[in-house]
Image (tube, coloured by chain):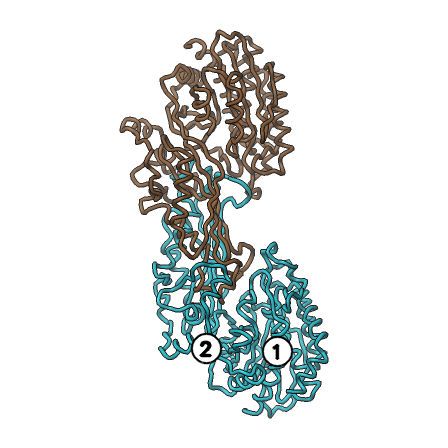
Chain colours: A cyan, B brown
Amino acid sequence: MQVIKQYIEEHKQRMLDELFELLRFPSVSADPKYKADVLKTAEYTAAKLREASADNVEVCPTAGYPIVYGEKIIDPAKPTVLMYGHYDVQPADPLELWKTPPFEPTVRDGKIYARGACDDKGQFYMHVKAFELMMQTNTLPCNIKFMIEGEEEVGSSNLGIFVKANTERLKADVVLISDTSMLSMETPSLETGLRGLSYLEVEVTGPNRDLHSGVYGGAVANPATILAKMIASLHDENNHIAIPGFYDEVVQLSDAERNALNSAPYNEEEYKKDLDIDEVWGEKGYSTLERTGTRPTLEVNGIWGGYIGEGAKTVLPSKANAKISMRLVPNQSSEKITELFTQHFLNIAPPYVKVKVTPHHGGEPVVTPTDSVAYQAAQKAITESFGKEPIPTRGGGSIPIVALFEAELGIKTVLMGFGLDSDALHSPNEKYDIYNYYKGIETIPLFYKYFAELS
Amino acid sequence: MQVIKQYIEEHKQRMLDELFELLRFPSVSADPKYKADVLKTAEYTAAKLREASADNVEVCPTAGYPIVYGEKIIDPAKPTVLMYGHYDVQPADPLELWKTPPFEPTVRDGKIYARGACDDKGQFYMHVKAFELMMQTNTLPCNIKFMIEGEEEVGSSNLGIFVKANTERLKADVVLISDTSMLSMETPSLETGLRGLSYLEVEVTGPNRDLHSGVYGGAVANPATILAKMIASLHDENNHIAIPGFYDEVVQLSDAERNALNSAPYNEEEYKKDLDIDEVWGEKGYSTLERTGTRPTLEVNGIWGGYIGEGAKTVLPSKANAKISMRLVPNQSSEKITELFTQHFLNIAPPYVKVKVTPHHGGEPVVTPTDSVAYQAAQKAITESFGKEPIPTRGGGSIPIVALFEAELGIKTVLMGFGLDSDALHSPNEKYDIYNYYKGIETIPLFYKYFAELS
């Protein structure tokens, strides 16, 4: 432990400077105009793995953005950890809401503000630095493999192909990922589950052209109004999702599990104050922690149609569109839910309009074991660095790769994240505490230590 | 009649060239970036009135865009016609849907394609040319006054002030407007009513920032979903508008009036084919002609919220907005309906969100008399030039000025329009038939002839 703290102390500034350099690449995978920047980010990541003395570092091409691989095999007989992260980030808009530019990392009050600061550049880079630390201090106790992709924010569509094609190279005993949150630095926690995802886009078409709302209004169905009615019908009066069969595969938690989950610290007043809302919302009969962690949800991520410029235009629009995504829980299947949604949405379309549904991407929900050697190693590592035993929680987000690993490589995952829900992931002014960054670099070597010992 | 046809024949090309010149000005009053062009259009209009030998031509300044005035008083003892039109046009977007540039008039198959071709440049300019014709052929039988404004497409907010301040100058026996449609050239018609308008913008705010839809989805109200539910609730299952008190002042038509209205030729199959829709839509218990002409309506003119760019962003948006307008019929009051909508929309807002309603502009509905001397003069003029008596119809559009004239000047209006519903007003590829343009120039002098005779 002393060795670790000392090494971090001596290399503090450089470790931060390197992260800032990484954060300056606008590696937005959703927007083609950033393609060159995304590719540069992959090269930078590979270079840093080499500097940290990883072997066989390679920027592996895929049909989309490349996957950065690197490894250090100290002894084939020792256990192997496969570290996963992603170097791509979410789009930064709405840009006008950023206090400082999203790709010019800025420190305010001990926090790094930048797109990707927490999700996931700040978190995956902790592993690169922790690896450097173990190599420089000769404390790496087992084998390590890195796999850092560039399409996590757009559905990891090429990762499955890569994993299937590289089962030997990726062989390991556990997957370690830092792309999730803790309850707080005072209340460390370990996520033991993730939700799946089905993301679709819908288009409602009425007349073949925009019409004068005075000449045709009242006699021709308005696609914006019809889309509103269709979206409104997707939740019933108890905010249950009204798609037939949607809940069929959902595993109900036991009362014990629900109580454990609800025992996690949660202050509704602070929660509402942070978001500036008067009331929380959600599925009747469930707490906020259950709604975000253990129940499936349906959200409108975007909606548009008609005249959205300045001033007034009296138009009856020809089309209206929406982006809609659903978070899934065990044992829902992304493919099946996507199919159920598509069928239902086409079924409820009235005869006045034409409806098109286009799937974007999806991922499967997972629950990670809490009785494994790796989970215990993570528990011990956090307990030592935070001085407190971590609470098991259920995360609301989705990391499709986790289910993929189980299916393709037959190995489980440990979700050892150091972010906070208040880090504004996917929002303007995303941040990551410098304290958390160093705390991660300090905790990760302890995980390796205990994982090697317990294995 | 012979004199008229001959004059038009001799000046055909020039009359068309001058209209094209007028159409090339992008006089979009809704968008400040066209300010210089709108002002140039006013100057051009004034110049053309002078050329046609109008007296006291003036570009009258207002708090917004100027009003072009001109007159010819041949004998104060004779009746006076006040001609109204507007030189401003609707925004041209979506530009990509125009086959040829909106401000480069192009003739295809006998039709002029350009923004404003019909609404209202093509139609008001017929009056300038008809005036020139009567002056050149010494056939002007009564006094004439022109008032052509530049803010009709944005609510004519300064016209009322101008009219109040100029009641003497604007003194007349009737208002003549060509800014409406006929059923077809084979079935000439005269509009005897116009709908009023209330246009508002609504904003629904949920959390104080865009949120990660995985971390918060299901526990925080989504403003796009809430807005959809609120909009969906504005029409009941029979497509009646569900705002308390909305229909209180609506005058029900007599069976005779309804039958007269429904006797107008209307081919539902052609109507649907033209719009490429499978079914018409609307308020239960009313025909398409009644729905557009005699019943109030509520339309979503625009809606937006969340991520509307390429690809997928898993965001729970902070805000969602919509532009909503209502068409009003006698005796609804725009001010009262705006108030009723605002109150209702705030009332149905759930506690999870904050709602803001901002009125844009409005106008009052009108019904014009069919027993007046002026209406009979219009009937005779159309019967002579079209060889068929015009059918009285009710228009769905709004021309706020008509109610204003009645209130401020105590005179009625005749709506002698030569457009067609298929002219794509407010839409891409707006058009006006060259045939209709000349037909109007031919009919207008006949109106003056019969109006003088019958007065």
Residue sitting nearer the eye, A70 or B220: B220
Badge 2 marks a residue whose secondary structure is strand
B428 sits left or right of B221 in the view:
right
Residue sitting nearer the eye, B326 or A83: B326
Residue farthest along the left direction in this orientation: B255
Q: Chain of mark 1?
A: A
Near mark 2 (Cα within 10 A), the count class, few <14, some 14-19 or many ≥20, is: some
Residue A309 is situated, as x and y percent measured from the top left of the image, at: 55, 44
Quarter of the image with the C terminus of chain B is top left
Q: CA distance from mark 1 to mark 2?
A: 25 Å
Residue A34 is situated, as x and y percent measured from the top left of the image, at: 65, 60
Residue sitting nearer the eye, B201 or B279: B201
Q: Image quadrant of residue A215?
A: top left
What residue is disc 2 on?
Answer: A367
| Marks 1 & 2, CB-CB < 8 Å contact | no
Residue B303 is situated, as x and y percent measured from the top left of the image, at: 48, 48
What residue is disc 1 on?
Answer: A439
Residue A400 is situated, as x and y percent measured from the top left of the image, at: 51, 72
Q: Look at label 1 and name its amino acid.
A: Lys
Give the residue drawn at x 38%, y 29%. B394
Q: Look at label 2 and name its amino acid.
A: Val
Near mark 1 (Cα within 10 A), the count class, few <14, some 14-19 or many ≥20, is: some
Q: Image quadrant of residue B413?
A: top left
Mark 1 or 2: in front is: 1
Camera sees residue A208: no
Q: Do the residues marked 1 and 2 share a common chain?
A: yes
Q: Chain of mark 2?
A: A
Measured along the vertical axis of the image, is residue B339 above or below residue B21? below
A240 sits left or right of B417 in the view:
left
